[in-house]
Image (cartoon, grey):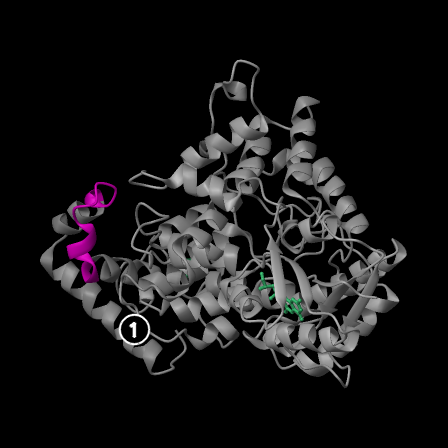
Amino acid sequence: MVTRLLPVLGDQLSHDLASLCAADKTTDVVVMAEVASEARYVPHHPKKIALIFAAMRQFADELRAQGWRVAYTQLTDPDNTHSLSGEILRYASLYGCDQVLATRAGEWRVIGEFDALPLRVSVVEDSRFLASHAEFQAWAEGRKQLRMEYFYREMRRKTGLLMQPDGTPEGGKWNYDAENRKRAQPDILRPKPLRFAPSAQTQAVLAMVAQHFGQNFGTLDDFWFATNRAEALQALDHFATYLLPSFGDTQDAMLVDDAFLNHAVLAPYLNLGLLGPMEICQRVQAEWQAGRVPLNAAEGFIRQVIGWREYVRGIYFREGPDYTSRNALGHTRPLPAFYWGAPTRMACVAAAVAQTRQQAYAHHIQRLMVTGNFALLAGVSPQELHMWYLAVYADAFEWVESPNTIGMSQFADDGIIASKPYVSSGAYIDRMSDYCGSCSYKVKEKTGPRACPFNLLYWDFLMRHEGRFAKNPRMAQMYRTWARMAPGHRETVLREAQALLARLDAGAVV
Ligand code: DLZ
Ligand code: SF4
């Protein structure tokens, strides 16, 4: 007798998942399915698909070892209906059971699909986050601006992380970001994220993904991700021991030959559910308490997890399903082909894209200030860019990726997340990276054939949106700088920017 079906999605691979906790091993059946509807709604990086499928298969094995019955559909199973709802319905009829117990999906699209099931579906909230939807709503209620910093402080108080007994933050400040903006030097001795040799099961997944998704952007070579909780815990331990001490210092730096610097690369595991946010932060806090890492490193890391990650999830669910289609700045340019690996002369973009193709990973500043910055300056459709980020990064799920893209990076939500657009000229990239030295453009040149495109497009962006941003107190200085430039120079900048965009539109190598 089967009483209920328990769908477990590819990003719900947690043994403490709310629906599993509320279920009964003796009468309920877990349903897991590798389906085309999820694997193909954007052209995911093959490494991302392999990670998810390999982790799903291992999680199913772990559940079985704990005594669960698991109905698991592999991608190539002949009966596969290739949608989540199709598989739930198929198992419902197979087991003669019309009750479903689900943990709320992390994406509106999938929530809608579950809502439409012609079965008796009960949904429990996903408890793997620090702030529930209700808690975020309560925090947001009545506020004019939803700034991450204030939400973060609430989360610090709630969790007690890096807090003193009297309710003040450790070290006296809430945020040590100002110490986390240093340049980095190439260092062949810098530790790297922990790598895992694929098991036989993961190798089978890799072969299958190569066959079915080999045409997608991204390489499968050298797959090293953790694919189960035990490995993810080792990766956490390795990060905390070897990489965390300098995490803050190099957090915003970019180097051509170092894809990871001191970044944790734990987000894929966290977002799949292999690790939980509190256990990661407690480990990081413990390193600081033991005097092994500086406060700016520990605080900077914890802020990303309990502040930023929870905050963007809150925004995604508060704003609703139309959030991903917002386009406040009216940007419609197609995503340039170099995002998918076509040649570009911009060394910074080429490096970020090459690394993305290889690793299904780039760090936050590469995403925000190189690929995101270029798209915003060039007026690329936020929707096309959103699909790109969602596809190419192993950690990207819509609830976390879309507020970062639509809101933070592209200002397409009209300033819900960001108080000003994150645009910069080449100078910022030059300051934070070693990209410019090897570029065919010259970062110091403002006009002329070798002028850095970021320099030209920066002013073009500001002028295109002068009406909207000139009065923004955080932008006014830039408009004053522009006003002080010689009229002839301003004309040249705008003419050359237009010519550059025309070349981009014509498919020339830019
Ligand atoms: C991202 C993804 C992919 C590529 N494939 C599957 C799948 O075949 N089966 C599955 O259950 N989940 C998959 N996922 C994750 C889902 O897309 C994810 O659960 C939703 O986007 C909600 O966050
Ligand atoms: Fe990028 Fe401009 Fe530097 Fe080239 S010169 S790497 S385009 S910022």
Give residue 355's quadrant in the image. bottom right
Magenta range = 463-477
Classify the position of the N terminus by image quarter.
Answer: bottom right
User: Percent position (x, y) of residue 436?
Assistant: 45, 57
Residue located at (57% from left, 36% from top)? 302
Q: Is residue 468 magenta?
A: yes
Residue depicted at 51% across the width and 61% down the height: 398
**Dot 1 corresponds to which residue?**
501
Horizontal relation, residue 337 to residue 211: left or right: left
Would residue 179 be seen by someone viewing this image from the given angle? no
Q: Nearer the viewer, residue 2 or 497?
A: 2
Looking at the image, which residue is at 85% across and 68% down? 201
Q: Residue at (77%, 50%) from the top-left corner? A: 229
x%, y% of residue 96? 76, 74
Near mark 1 (Cα within 10 A), the count class, few <14, some 14-19 or many ≥20, is some
Up the image or down, 16 lies above or below 221; here it is above
Q: Quadrant of residue 73?
A: bottom right
Which of these two is toward me, 56 or 252? 56
Is residue 46 placed above or below 468 in the rendered structure? below
